[in-house]
Structure formats: structure tokens, C-alpha cells
Amino acid sequence: MKKNLRVIFFGTPDFAVPSLETLVANNINVVSVVTRPDRPKGRGRRLAAPPVKERAESLGIPVLQPDKIRGEEFMAKIKALEPDLFAVTAYGRILPPTLLDFPRFGTINVHPSLLPKYRGAAPIQWALIRGETETGVTIMQMDEGEDTGDILIAEKISIQTRKSDSGAMETVETAGTLSVKLAELGGRLLAKTIDLIIEKKLKARKQNEHPATHARMLKKEDGEIDWTRPAHDIGCLIRGLDPWPTAYTTLSKKRFRLFNPLVIPKQVMEQPGELCKADDEGLLIATGKNYLLIREVQREGSKRMAAGPFLRGCRLETGLIFGKG
């Protein structure tokens, strides 16, 4: 039955690759992949294929890269493939109703949050920014709304923490590391969902609107650190914006990107943003509540590096105030 079900997979970035690979590994008949067009990349601005395209071609799956998904030309290509189901993971475009409802089993989507929390474009980042202790993946039946469709399957995972050398608990996840885990989980749940669709064992449930939250798309400006905030909140921001768009502060009109934070719970005597200590352990900075130890730094125009090597190339005196321009 799996090989009789004709699936078209929609996806574009690295996050979508495990979903495609898992479908193929589970003998699900992916008749085509739809992904975004090649885009200029890097300093040379050469055209680069999306990760999903590269993987699909290596698996021998035909690829479609439409400039427009609304219109007769693309719809004719879809109809010719006679799909039974669309599976979507981070495609990057909103599918119109004519596409969503075309396959007999409709369109299902991999969303990296526990819906209805964190609907929108950046659920992984916002879960970390807001200090969540758990997140997960939801497979939903897509409708015209933004991640508002009926829930088919959901599975949660804990956001990993550990005890630091100082005895303080710290979250070790970044948006980058958490994305990898959720991508793998999403692939497994997507394959499981399709199996249950084939076996007619799925029962969809409506989303509860009361706890719904929105995870809007991030901008570079979101990364500017307000040192009057508590160290915990700033640490969450740093982890949630790593690797993009990154959290930053300024000093002498230079931008410094900050990574790998650790909250040091101690009453603050200095003003927010003041550099209290700088050594191989990191930059100890005062905040609105507690201190924050920054263990990796990237100065504007330089590479990301651990605090020790960074300080050997960029001498910083204690008493400096970050965030003052």
C-alpha cells in the first residue's frame, strides 16, 4: 500500500532534509519534490541549490522549482503526477487552497513546536528566547491559516540543561542544536503519520485557540541586547538567536556578537552592561539581575572564538560599558 500512495514532498532548507530521507527510508513513494528556486549565495553570489534539491537529486527523485505556485502551469504539472498526499516541511511559501485540497488525503505539515504554541515562522528560536523547558513537533493537516490546522500527531522533547562547573543550571541548547533534534523527530513523525493515514488509524483534533502564541519572523535588530534585563532573559536571547541572526552589543561603535552564556547568580553592584572581569573563563558582565558570563565572542569583521583567544587579540579593560554605542 505504501508504494501505491503517491506523495509529493515540499521542502527547502536543511531542516527539511531528514523528513525527505525518512520518507524514502520507510519505502514511501515520493514521486516528486517541490522546492524553492536556486538563489545567489556567498561573496561570489553564485547560484546555489537548496539542500532539499541536492538531497532529492542524490536519491533520484524528480525536482520541481517553480517561481510561482499559483497558476495553471504549475498546477498542470502537479495534476500530471496524480498525487494522493502532499507532505510539507519548511517549504517557505504559503500553499493556496487549490493546492492544499487537491490530493485526496490533503496536505500535512511538519511544524517544530507543540501547537497551538508558537505558530509562525520562527518557533524554535522563540521557544528558547522565552525560556521554555520543553518543545516538540506537531504534524498537522494544513488549512488556509498560519499553522491553525487540525493536529494529527504531536511529540514533546525536553530542552536540555546541565549543571555548570559553578553549580548553576544552564540551558545548553541553541536554535542550531535544537533545530537538528527537531528535524530528526519531524522526519520520524511524518513517516509515522503517513503509515497511520494508510491504515486509517488517525483521528484529527482541533487546536485550542486559548493558549495559542505567535512566533514571528526574526530580524537582525531583534538581537540587540538590553543589559537592564535579567541575565536569564539575555542568556535565553543569545541561545535563541544562535546561529542567526545572533545577539549583539556595541562598544565604541563596534558590534560584538555574543555566544555561550552562563548566568552567575549573584547580587549586582555595578551598572548594567559593565564589564566586571575578562579572562579565559569569559567576559563577566553586569545585568539588571545577576551577572552573565560570555564564553564566546565575535568582534565585527572577525571570527567567532572562545573568550581566551579573543581577549589576546582584543584587550578589554574592566569598567567598560557595553551597549553605550
Image: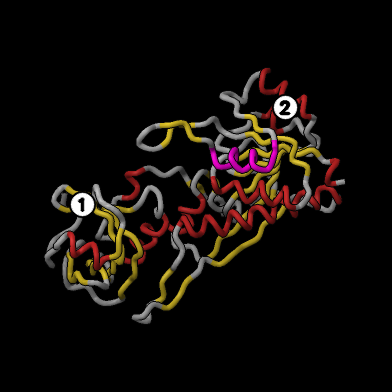
Could you tell me what secondary structure mostly forms the magenta stretch?
A: helix
Evaluate whether residue 146 shows in this view. no
Residue at 60% from the left image edge and 38% from the top image edge? 53
Observer-nearest of 290 and 94: 94
Tell me the number on the disc at residue 78.
2
Please say whether residue 246 is one of the residues in the magenta stretch: no
Observer-nearest of 136 and 303: 303
Q: Tally the numbered discs.
A: 2
Name the residue tied to disc 1.
Answer: 250
Residue at 70% from the left image edge and 37% from the top image edge? 61
Q: Quadrant of residue 156?
A: bottom right
Residue at 64% from the left image edge and 19% from the top image edge? 71
Look at the numbered disc 1 and give the secondary structure of its residue. strand
Q: Which residues are magenta?
A: 50-61
Look at the numbered disc 2 and give the secondary structure of its residue. helix
- Amino acid carrying mark 1 in the image: Thr
Distance from the alpha carbon under mark 1 to that under mark 2: 50 Å
- Does residue 107 appear left or right of residue 323 in this picture? right
Numbered disc in front, either 1 or 2: 2
- Amino acid carrying mark 2 in the image: Ile
- Identify whether 133 is placed above or below 215: below
Position in image of residue 294 (x %, y %): 29, 65
